[in-house]
Each structure stands twice: as C-alpha cells, then as structure tokens.
Image (cartoon, rainbow, N blue to C red):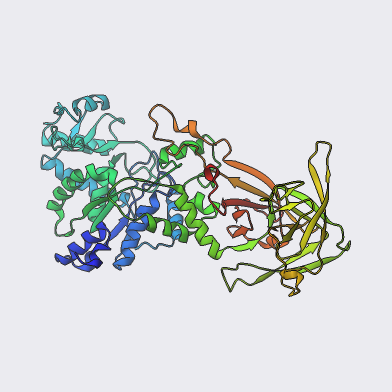
Amino acid sequence: MSEEKKSLNFLEQIIEEDLANGMPKENLRFRFPPEPNGYLHIGHTKAIGISFGLGLKYNAPVNLRFDDTNPAKEEQEYVDAIKNDIAWLGYTWANECYSSDYFHQLYDWAVLLIKDGKAYVDSQTSEEMRIQKGTPTKAGTNSPFRNRSLEENLSLFQDMKDGKFKEGEHVLRAKIDMSSPNMLMRDPLMYRILYKLHHRTGTEWCIYPMYDWAHGESDYVEQISHSLCSLEFKPHRELYDWFKDNVHDYSADAYPLVPKQREFSRLNLSYTIMSKRKLLKLVEENIVSGWDDPRMPTISGLRRRGYTPASIRSFVETVGVSKRENVIDVALLEFKIREDLNKTANRVMAVLDPVKVVITNYPEGKEEILQAENNQEDETAGFRELPFSREIFIEKEDFQEEANKKFFRLKLGSEVRLKNAYIIKAESCTKDENGNVIEIQCTYDALSKSGSGTEESLRKVKGTLHWVSVKHAVKTEVRAYDRLFLDEAPDAHKDKDFMEFLNPNSLEIIDAFVEPSMQSAKIGERFQFQRLGYFCVDNDTTASKLVFNKTVGLRDSWGGN
C-alpha cells in the first residue's frame, strides 16, 4: 500500500476504490441528515465534519437534509438552529432538502411494494407486534394479517391515508423475514397513523413514514453516492439495502445511482450527555437556561460560551475517523479552544475577587495613560490605552500578609510588578472586624514603569499581577462555568439516573471589574483576562450592563491539576 493511501482514512479509501472501479467523480454526492427534534451538539460535529470535509476534498456537493418524519417532536425552531450552527461552523450546503419533500414519492413506492406482495397492513396492537417479533435468540412468528389480499391491503392503506382510522389502529409493514437473525428485518414498520401538525406539510398527511423507510429512499432520490452514518446504524444497513434495492427495481431509469451506506464511530465526550432526549429534559426542568446555555454541549451553547468554529473543526480533525467506539477526553476540546484563543484573543485585565490597593506615595488626583499590548501572539493586534491611578484593585488571592518563599505574589515587605505599570511594595494592610483584609497600603517605584527604558524599569521581580484602576473600573457580571456533570460517563450507569451526577457548582455568578476598554466590547467578542482565562461577551449584555462567560481557564484545573 502506498504512503498516500495509508494516510487516507477508511472512508476516503472506500471512495478512492469506487472511483478506481469506474464511478465518475461527478457522481460523488454526500449529505448531512439531522432530524429537527433538537439542537445540534458536539457529537454531531464529527458527522458534519466528515460529510462536508469529503465534499471539500472531492469538490462534491453536500446536501443538508432534514429527516422530518416525526411531527410529534419536530419544530421549525430546530430547523433554523441547525442551519445557523452549520453555517457558523463554516460549511456551505449545496441543497436544502427535507424528507417531507418526498412524501408523495414514498407513498407511491409503498403502494408498489404492496402490489408486489412485499408490504401489508397489520392491525395488531403494538404489544401484540412486540411479542410476535420474537427475541434476538428466538425467531418471530407471522402476523395473522400477513397474508391479507392485495385488494384489502391497498384499500386499508388508502383509508389510512384518508384519515379513516385512529392512531395505532393499523400500520404498514414490509414483508421480509420473521426469522431473520437481524431483528430489524422482521417485517419492519413503514408507516404509522399520526394526527399531528407537520411543520412543513401541515395537515396534508396523517400517515408518516418510519425513519428506516424514509431515510434510505431520501438518499436514493437525492442520488447520494455515499450515505455516511454512525455505528449504531450498522445493523440498519441490511434493511437500508433491502428498501433501496426493491425501490430501484421501479425507478432505475429516473434514479440510476444506488447509494452505499458506510458507518463510522460516534463522537463520545467525557463528562457529557449526547442524548437529545436527555438534553431536552435539562431544558424542560430548568436545570439550564435553554439549549444555548453555555454549559450545554450544543453547538449554540459552545458558541455562546466563546468557542470558535476553528477550535471545533480542529478538535474534530484531531479526533479523526475510525470504526471503533471510544470516549474522547473533554480536555482535548478545551485544549483546542485555548490553542485558538491564545493566537486570536486580545489580552485585557479584569479582577474577579477585588481588594483595594492604595499606593501611598503616588500623587493624589494624578492619572496617567499607560500603553498595553493587545496580543503578543499577533503583531497586528496593536496597543490599547490603560488608565492608572493611586487606587487599584487586585485579586484577594494575590495578597498574603505572610507567606513562604514559594509565594511570588504580594506580601508584606515584598515587591511585585503591576502588569504594564510599576513595581509596588506592600507596607501594611487594613482589616475589618472579622479579620479580613479590606485594603493594602503600598509604595511604588516611580522609575520602574514598564517600557520606559530606565534601569529601574528593567529590574526583575518574581511576581507580576494584573490590576484595574478603581476610578476607571467597569463593573461587570462574570458567569464562571464548570462541567455540568461530575461523572465521566453520567448516562452509563444502569442503576442511576444521569440527573444524579449534576454538578451543583456548575455556575458561579461573580461581580467583577474590568478595564475601561471593555465598555466597547461587542456581544460574542472573546478576550483573555490576563492570568485568569478566556472570556466571551454574553448575549445578555446591554448598554448598561456587561456580562462575560468564562470559556476556559488558561490551563486545565479539573481535578486539582
């Protein structure tokens, strides 16, 4: 095998082999087929990246198709959110399609299957069907309605379509093999009666195709060359092929290309729930503020938290394409956003837990404007103005009255440098009646200003602190997020509900102060709060109130690291 072929993932190898065996390159077409019953989450980004990535690699179209066959759970809100998320990730689809576009064609094909004796109307209850379907180790038994006449089946199916029966009274099933070792091949359902308003077709239909019937035939209508899906659909491939091959007998002239289904491993992330049903429960029970809560693994939640499209695409690329299920450490995702924001985010100063410092030998009433570099990783980022005055805020944890030699921050009798400013020395402190330090008195070295070029400005001290001028500080709300679950696999416990592993401290709301340059910050902008982490301006920000979300710390602090 050549080095070039070795570097291809197994899906690319399949495509290359198909091309080598005569498939015209112009026949390549892919799709991403979400069901609009919830918001996309980080697990979907792998499927998105694979399909759209192959489209880019082979210059082939990629359809965005909504598998909208269950009006009981699907909403236009989800359609809009999915489109928004995919576009935000940086991908462009060739055609926007819906399984509901093909409802008439699917119905016509179902009638043909009935006429060929390959489908029948079953009138058993769902419990009766469950029992007669057998078990993985025991063959099923035929439905008592399996041998209905052609005329009766056609009449009943027409009446189902015309709304003459109640929900659950009849279903249409494919007639395949009730003894098949693959349970999905034991006369699977094709249609059920459902009196629900569909977000696109309204009340036109009261019978709706099941996923397995609609999905493969939608691929077929769109002439998708490679139907790529996650591993849980591997047992469905046999049924996918059965439906597709039988329909191809009727429509080979109109639809000459027969799609090929292939499966890849899902993206599973530690400390994360991927089930839409369980994510919906978090929303409905107000555990989170909505689908875009920054603690949610949804793409909209990650976006609101401050994640970038580039960081998510890089994460998916690093995870790669494989056939074996595994769990990816969420720390990799956090590493990717740190890596990206380190290059792109401007540096600013903020104090989250302030204590006042008074520089006693700095002239009262004096103010000066210092120059601060926006991002040392980006030469084009430029500088900003930073006001300095006699009173500043620093973090409470950056001061101790007495400390050991390994404490390089501010302590009585020692010096530290204020970032972009001067060297100060702690002389004394004032405490409240409970013994808490409420003010620190310091002196400063007037010749030590950063960047002034004096010998004193080059003097080395071991600690450098961030700070904000009291007079110029802008009060802001900071939402510090932690992982939503305390367990690495919260939904993997058979004897416990995933809700039992919720982290009660997943959100801390902090009244903080930021430098005045932040007054012009726009919703969605990302910054590094120096020495603290990366933060993003939240949607709740108004003209009178700044709100920041903590995206991620400067280093992994999970588990006390």
Q: Nearer the viewer, residue 223 or 457?
A: 457
Q: Is residue 192 visible in the rendered structure shown here?
A: yes
Q: Residue at x 24, y 55 (%)?
A: 221
Would residue 129 be found to the left or right of residue 413 on screen?
left
Q: Is residue 132 above or below residue 503?
A: above
Would residue 79 be found to the left or right of residue 65 on screen?
right
Where residue 209 sits, quadrant-wise, is: top left
Would residue 214 be found to the left or right of residue 91 on screen?
left
Q: Is residue 134 above or below residue 51?
A: above
Q: Position of residue 97 (x, y in %)?
A: 33, 55
Q: Is residue 124 visible in the rendered structure shown here?
A: no
Q: Residue at x 68, y 59 (%)?
A: 462
Would residue 73 be found to the left or right of residue 482 on screen?
left
Q: Nearer the viewer, residue 491 or 88?
A: 491
Q: Is residue 58 above or below residue 276?
A: below
Q: Position of residue 102 (x, y in %)?
A: 28, 51
Where residue 146 sits, quadrant-wise, is: top left
Q: Nearer the viewer, residue 398 or 75?
A: 398
- Name the residue furthest right: 364
Number of marks:
0
Q: Position of residue 311 (x, y in %)?
A: 47, 58
Q: Position of residue 56 (x, y in %)?
A: 33, 66
Where residue 31 sits, quadrant-wise, is: bottom left
Q: Residue at x 54, y 65 (%)?
A: 343
- Name the residue furthest front: 405
Q: Nearer the viewer, residue 163 or 497?
A: 497
Quarter of the image with the N terminus is bottom left
